[in-house]
Image: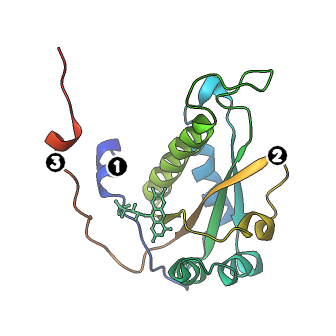
Amino acid sequence: METVKCIRERRSVRKFDTSREVSAELIESVIDTARFSPSWKNTQVTRYTVLTGESKNALAACTNVWAKNGDIMRSAPMVVALSVVDKRSGFERDGSFSTPLGNGWQMFDCGIAAQSFCLAAFDAGLSTLIMGLYDDNAAEVIGIPDGQILTALIAVGYADESPAAPSRKELTDLITYKN
Ligand SMILES: Cc1cc2nc3c(=O)[nH]c(=O)nc-3n(C[C@H](O)[C@H](O)[C@H](O)COP(=O)(O)O)c2cc1C
């Protein structure tokens, strides 16, 4: 798919076709593309935990902070948990921050990877929803290893809805020119 079309037409989907699984080969091809995302000094700190079946349903069952996200996880055949290896991206070897933005760069890197993931998934015919609202014990329920921070959950599957694009701000609200 053409890149601009992919960026413009990808939508967050909250209702999935429960009769269609996502194959291991397909999700691996999506992550294979996402790993080409840029990262701080090429530290490549983003990790992907692929949840299906019981492990996905266990996560859905403990998603109470925003219960709708739990329903979405149940309807999706797969949830991919994104985590980052802590204290690498944006950090010096002695553990100090490289810039005044502190530990923000690891989230920045993971955000880029998340967008690459969602675009690669869309290109492969899949739909996604990034979820930032999950309960405090989610990392433990998923089994995110020590030294990593859970950063986002992404529901993945085949869409059972075609949402319209939510409105976007005007360019004049976004761009400032200086010369
Ligand atoms: C960091 C982040 C966290 C989000 N968290 C949630 C969430 O917890 N639940 C949800 O339904 N949508 C969530 N969304 C989806 C946004 O609401 C959605 O991207 C936005 O409304 C624009 O719609 P679009 O993705 O179709 O362009 C999240 C998106 C991002 C980027």
Residue at mark 1 to residue at mark 3: CA–CA distance: 17 Å
- Amino acid type at mark 3: Glu
Residue beneath label 3, please?
170
Place of residue 34 in the rendered image (x, y in percent of width and height, measured from the top left) = 57, 44
- Amino acid type at mark 2: Gly
Query: Which of the two marks, 1 or 3, is nearer to us in this view?
Result: 3
Q: Residue at x 68, y 84 (%)?
A: 61
- Amino acid type at mark 1: Ile
Q: Residues within 10 Å of mark 3 (few under 14, many from 20)?
A: few
Q: Residue at x 29, y 52 (%)?
A: 8
Q: What element does badge 3 sit on?
A: loop
Q: Nearer the viewer, residue 87 or 17?
A: 87
Q: What element does badge 1 sit on?
A: helix
Q: Residue at x 54, y 39 (%)?
A: 108
Badge 2 or badge 1: first in the primary sequence: 1
Residue at mark 2 to residue at mark 1: CA–CA distance: 32 Å
Q: Would residue 51 appear left or right of 153 to someone viewing this image?
A: right
Q: Nearer the viewer, residue 110 or 22?
A: 110
Image quarter in which the C terminus is found: top left
Residue beneath label 2, please?
147
Q: Determine whether the beta carbon of the residue marked 3 sits less than 8 angstroms from the nearest atom of ligand 1.
A: no
Q: What element does badge 2 sit on?
A: loop
Place of residue 84 in the rendered image (x, y in percent of width and height, measured from the top left) = 69, 45
Place of residue 168 in the rendered image (x, y in percent of width and height, measured from the top left) = 23, 55
Q: Is residue 5 above or below residue 154?
A: above
Q: Would residue 36 appear left or right of 123 to someone viewing this image?
A: right
Q: Residues within 10 Å of mark 2 (few under 14, many from 20)?
A: few
